[in-house]
């Protein structure tokens, strides 16, 4: 990623020459990471896997498999790695998860979490992983029924317990279970529910950059035009305002 110093616009550069031939995954190297960095980078890996999985347009079975492995490992180990940074098994699981998720989104691509998140982290200097963690469940909720089947798959892949009063376990109910798990995980990792950094005068710029980055390049489950994206950003601001008011009470 590069950031233009004057405008704070983030952009990515890519070239085959930048692609590594090998990756060495040594969990010992991550043992000293502070808990917040573990949480935020772990949530970024989750975001790569979930966005790649819900995009699906370019995925082959290989990308779907990589997403499944990554999400399962993160479900098992992110909280442990956050709470006990010396747990080498959890560290190794997270390293492998990040690697699998990276392989998945190399073809499957990321979506609006990244498009909007890049604009926010560039403008306000907030860490990438933190913004990803904050936005991930909100964007997935905003996609609505277009991602029910995919999120339901992820719920099954993690063998999550699904609670239904009437015994009907529909895709919507399983998707909701997965969404709630992401929201609860965020909370346990000390990540705020909403982004509180957005200034009203920046909203149009954020929408413009996110649109430029995502449309039509990212194979998102549904395409949002500028107005729809603006409504999403405004909803995030409103959420942050209410969250702030609640805290001050
Ligand atoms: Fe990312």
Image (cartoon, rainbow, N blue to C red):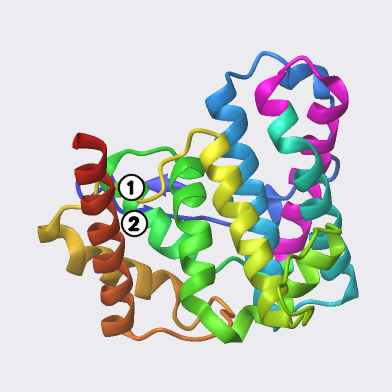
The answer to whether one can see residue 15 in this image is no
How many C-alpha atoms fall within 10 Å of the one at disc 2: few (<14), some, or many (≥20)? many
Label 2, ligand 1: CB separation under 8 Å: no
Give above or below for 152 relative to 243. Answer: below
Q: Position of residue 76 (x, y in %)?
A: 81, 42
Give the alpha-carbon distance from disc 1 to disc 2, as whole Å. 5 Å
Q: Position of residue 120 (x, y in %)?
A: 33, 52
Q: Which mark is residue 212?
A: none
Residue 171 horizontal side relative to residue 194, left or right: right
Q: Front-most of 85 and 13?
A: 85
Region rendered in magenta: 81-106
Which residue position holds label 2? 119
Q: Position of residue 118 (x, y in %)?
A: 41, 54
Q: Front-most of 13 and 199?
A: 199
Q: Which mark is residue 122?
A: 1
Residue 12 horizontal side relative to residue 233, left or right: right
The residue lying at 43 percent from left, 38 percent from top is 127
Labelled pair 1, 2 in contact (Cβ < 8 Å): yes
User: To which quarter of the image does residue 32 belong?
Assistant: top right
Q: Front-most of 22 and 49?
A: 49
Give above or below for 60 relative to 117. Answer: below
């Amino acid at each position: 990623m590069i950031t233009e110093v004057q405008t704070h616009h983030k952009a990515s550069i890519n070239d085959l020459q930048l692609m590594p031939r090998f990756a060495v995954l040594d969990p010992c190297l991550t043992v000293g990471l502070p808990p917040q960095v573990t949480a935020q980078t772990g949530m970024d890996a989750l975001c790569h896997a979930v966005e790649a999985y819900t995009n699906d347009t370019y995925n082959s079975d290989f990308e779907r498999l990589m997403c499944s492995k990554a999400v399962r490992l993160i479900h098992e180990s992110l909280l442990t790695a956050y709470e006990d940074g010396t747990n080498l098994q959890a560290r190794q699981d997270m390293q492998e998860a990040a690697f699998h998720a990276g392989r998945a989104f190399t073809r499957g691509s990321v979506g609006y979490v990244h498009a909007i998140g890049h604009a926010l982290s560039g403008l306000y200097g907030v860490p990438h992983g933190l913004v990803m963690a904050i936005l991930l469940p909100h964007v997935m909720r905003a996609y609505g029924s277009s991602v029910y089947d995919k999120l339901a798959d992820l719920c099954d892949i993690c063998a999550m317990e699904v609670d239904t009063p009437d015994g009907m376990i529909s895709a919507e109910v399983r998707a909701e279970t997965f969404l709630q798990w992401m929201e609860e995980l965020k909370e346990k990792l000390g990540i705020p529910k909403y982004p509180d950094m957005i200034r009203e005068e920046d909203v149009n710029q954020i929408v413009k950059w996110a649109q430029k980055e995502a449309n039509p390049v990212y194979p998102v489950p549904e395409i949002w035009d500028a107005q729809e994206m603006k409504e999403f950003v405004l909803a995030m601001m409103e959420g942050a305002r209410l969250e702030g008011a609640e805290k001050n009470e």
